[in-house]
Image (cartoon, rainbow, N blue to C red):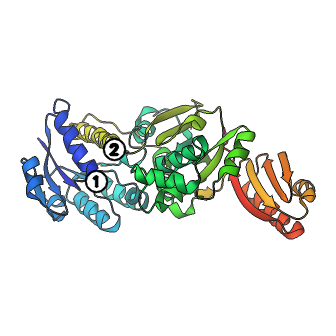
Amino acid sequence: MIRIGMLGFGTVGRSVYDLLQAHTESFPDMQIVSVAVRQITEQRMALYPTVQFTTNPDTIVTASDIDVVIEVMGGQTETYRYLRRALHSGKHVITANKDLIATYGETLQKIASAHQLTLLYGASVAGGIPILDALTNLLPGDETMQVGGIINGTSNFILTQMSDAAMNYDDALALAQRMGIAEANPVNDVAGFDARYKLAILAKTAFGANVVTTQIPTQGIQEINATLLDDAKRLGYVIKPLAVARRTGQELAMTVGPHLVPAAHLLGKIDNVQNAVQVKTRNIQDLVFTGPGAGAKPTASAVLSDLAIVHDIVCGRQLVHEKPSLQQPVIIGTAAGRYIRVTAPATYEIDAIAQANQIGIKTMWVRSHRATILTDTVSPATLARFEAALQQQIGAKIEIVLPVYQE
C-alpha cells in the first residue's frame, strides 16, 4: 500500500480525495491517510472518517509511514520548507503550486534527485491540459523550439467579454469576480504575474531552463480598451493574453502580455476561461493542447495524473526523459511586429523617422494628432530607438505598444 499525506483540503484537496475514491480500480494500492488543515471540525471528521486530520503539516512531511506528499495548500516560503523537509524525509512530492515551483523548483528538484525521489507539478500549469507530461515524455526524440499560448483563464475571460459583449474593462472584471473567475484582488492575473510563473515552469520543462521570473518581459491587460480592440479587428486581429518562450541557441525570447493574434489563428478562437498551449518542435511544426486551465476538478485530475506517474516509478515502470538543459539562459525580449499608438503634434513626420530607424511600417492611419501604426518584425532594441526618436524629434507620447504574435 502506498500511503499518501496531503497538505491542504480546500476545493482542490477535496476534489483530489473524491476523485481518488471514485477511481479505486485505477489506484487500488494508494490511499490518502493523513491531511493537514487549518482547522479540524466535527463535520469534516464525520465526512471523512478514514482520514487522520492534523493542524501540523510537519507531522505529515516527517512521518515514517507516509510515502507521497501532495501539496495543495498554496503559499511559498513556509510551504517550500515543508516540501523540502518531505523530500529530505524520503517522500515523493506532488504539488499544484505554480508560484512555489517557479521560485523554488530548481532547488527542490536537486534535493529530490539527490534522494532518488520524484518531484512532480503537472497541475501547476493549465491544470486541465497535460502539457507538462507531454513536454517531458511524449516527444523524447525531438527538440522543443517554442512553447506558449493562453495560460491565464481570468485574463482571457475579461478580454473575451470586452470583445464579444462590448463591456469595458472594469465591468468585465466585476463580472469575472461575481462568477468566481477572478480573485477579489485580481492583480496576479490581470498584471500577468500568474502567466509569468507558468511560463517559467513551461521553459524549465521544455528547455531545461532555470528562469528568474522577474527577467521575463511582462505586460498586463489593464490598459486594453474598446479602441484597441476595434483597431485590432480592423487589422484582422483579436487581442489575446499570451505567454510565449522561443529558443534560439542559448537565448530564450520570452514575453507575457496582450498580443495581436490573427483572428483566423486557433489561439484567436480560444475564448473565456479556456487555455491553449502551442508547441513547436524541430520535427513537428505545430501541436496545440486546449482545455480548461483551472478549476478544482481539472486541477485534481492533473494531480492524479502525477500520482499515477509516482505509482509507476515506485513500481519500477516509469521512464522520465530528460530534456537538454539550457541551465542559465540569456533572457531576451521577443522580435515581433508591433501595434503602436502615439499622439504627436507632427504625425506627418512619423514615416520619415521610422525609415531612419529601420522600421518597416505595414499600415498607419492618423486621426487628428493620434497615429496608429502596425510595423514589420522589429527587435526590442530597434523598437526602443524608434520610440526614443519619436519622443525627442516630434514630442510624441507613446500611448501603448502591443506585440503581434509570430507564427
> In the displayed structure, does residue 119 sit left or right of residue 366?
left
> In the displayed structure, does residue 341 sit left or right of residue 403?
right
Image quarter for residue 282? Answer: top right
What residue do we see at 49% from left, 44% from top? 206
Q: Amino acid at mark 2?
A: Thr
Q: Tell me the tag on residue 221.
A: none
Residue corresponding to mark 1 = 72
Dot 2 falls on a residue whose secondary structure is helix
Marks 2 and 1 sit apart, C-alpha to C-alpha, by 10 Å
> In the displayed structure, does residue 117 sit left or right of residue 276?
left
Q: Mark 2 packing: few (<14 Cα in 10 Å), some, or many (20+)? A: many
Which residue occupies the foreground of this view, 248 or 128?
128
Q: Amino acid at mark 1?
A: Val
Quadrant occupied by the N terminus: top left
Residue 171 horizontal/vertical position (percent):
53, 54
Q: Mark 1 packing: few (<14 Cα in 10 Å), some, or many (20+)? A: many
What residue do we see at 28% from left, 58% from top? 73
Which circle's residue, 2 or 1, is located before the other in the chain?
A: 1
Residue corresponding to mark 2 = 299
Q: Is residue 327 visible?
A: no
Residue 52 horizontal/vertical position (percent):
9, 54
Quadrant occupied by the C terminus: top right
Dot 1 falls on a residue whose secondary structure is loop
Which residue occupies the foreground of this view, 273 or 403?
273
Q: Are marks 2 and 1 in contact (CB under 8 Å)?
A: yes
Q: Is residue 380 visible?
A: yes
Q: How many marks?
A: 2
Residue 297 horizontal/vertical position (percent):
31, 41
Residue 136 horizontal/vertical position (percent):
42, 40
What residue do we see at 32% from left, 59% from top? 74
